[in-house]
Image (spheres, rainbow, N blue to C red):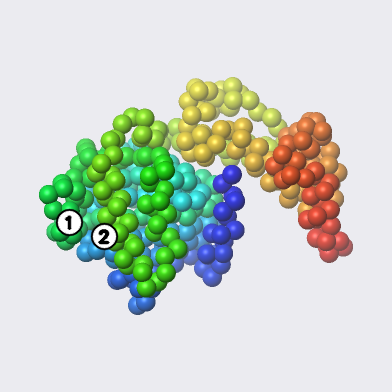
Amino acid sequence: MYHQHLPKIQTALADVPDGLLLEEHHPVADGKGGVRHTEAIPGGKGQKTSWEVFPGCTLVFQDFLAGQVSCQHGAERGLLEINYCRYGRVGWNMKDGSSIYLGPGDFSLHTRQLCAGSVMTFPVGHYEGLAIWLDLSKFDMALPDFLGGTGVTAQALAEKFCAGGTSATLTGNEKTEPIFGGFYGQPEPLQQAYFRLKVMELLLHLSAVSLSPKREADKYQTEQVEIARSVHDYILQHMEQRVTIQELSQRYLINPTTLKAVFKAVYGDSLAAHMNEHRMEKAALLLTQTKDSIAQIAQAVGYESQSRFSVVFRETYEMSPLEYRKLHGKSRIDGNK
């Protein structure tokens, strides 16, 4: 589910060396005159490309192949940050002790006071998305004339969605997707105009939308999120075993219902569905890189029944394990002789 766009992100980051985050800022959205600098990302790599769209408004495109990256900035109460997840998943452990996660189409709002010194995590190992930074005082001083009298300001949005220093996380829908999608794929001569148009459209939409409990995504305490991640790592390390929710809840001292809810919030799928995806990925790897029998591979990924394993594998890859090995594995195995 989350890996279908991975090749696109890998291509976008092909020229970025492993272990580095490349940041490039353009004073205007013309693709020229960018200022570059780099910082280290242990065990991953990433790229941020930003443009100044309006005075006090910066648009940042982000691509990551990593597990996490530190958010090194000050506690800026006067800067509102809007984040949108296009592909993959992304999350933050906030200063108030809560954790929020975004899946494809989701977006969030918070002031940079809340995420200062936090860690930006990528539960499925990759992420593509964008951020919009709004300086509350500077941006509102340069609002277009057509917004006069509407009450649409960055300050009003901060008070609406982030009152009391909190954050708001919302699920995308048929109205928000064209807005965020319009930031991508625009020809260079028209980028600045499109970026300005889409920022204004987003602010108008956010000003009109009602923030209700049904629209706001669940937030969980950081310690609950850490348990879900520990469960994830444990199952990956013991993939040959079939562990029940009840056994995991007893091992990690967490209510089974809470564990299922938090795991889905972090990884975007039920525990069973997410781990089955990992099992099929490992099975595909074993089929192409080893000469193990189908029965051995089935056991290695937690299936006692070879026939059941073959059914699930066919549902995932639309071919049998043997057909997959013949198509993808023979030349690799022969080439290693």
Residue 233: % across, % down: 58, 40
**Relative height, residue 105 to residue 244 (above, below):** below
Location of mark 1 (residue): 146
Residue at point 56%, 46% (across, down): 2
Outermost residue toward the left?
Answer: 149
The answer, for residue 145, to whether it is visible in the render is: yes
Q: Position of residue 107 (x, y in %)?
A: 38, 45
Q: Is residue 153 left or right of residue 94?
A: left
Residue 247: image tag: none
Q: From mark 1 to mark 2, how far is it between C-alphas?
A: 17 Å
Residue at coordinates 59% horizontally, 44% vertically from top-left? 1
Instruction: Give me the residue at 37% from left, 73% from top.
Output: 189
For residue 110, say whether it is visible. Answer: no
Name the spot of residue 140 as percent of width and height, x first.
17, 55
| Amino acid marked by disc 1 | Phe
- Which quadrant of the view contains residue 217? top left
Type of amino acid at the residue the image marks with label 2: Cys
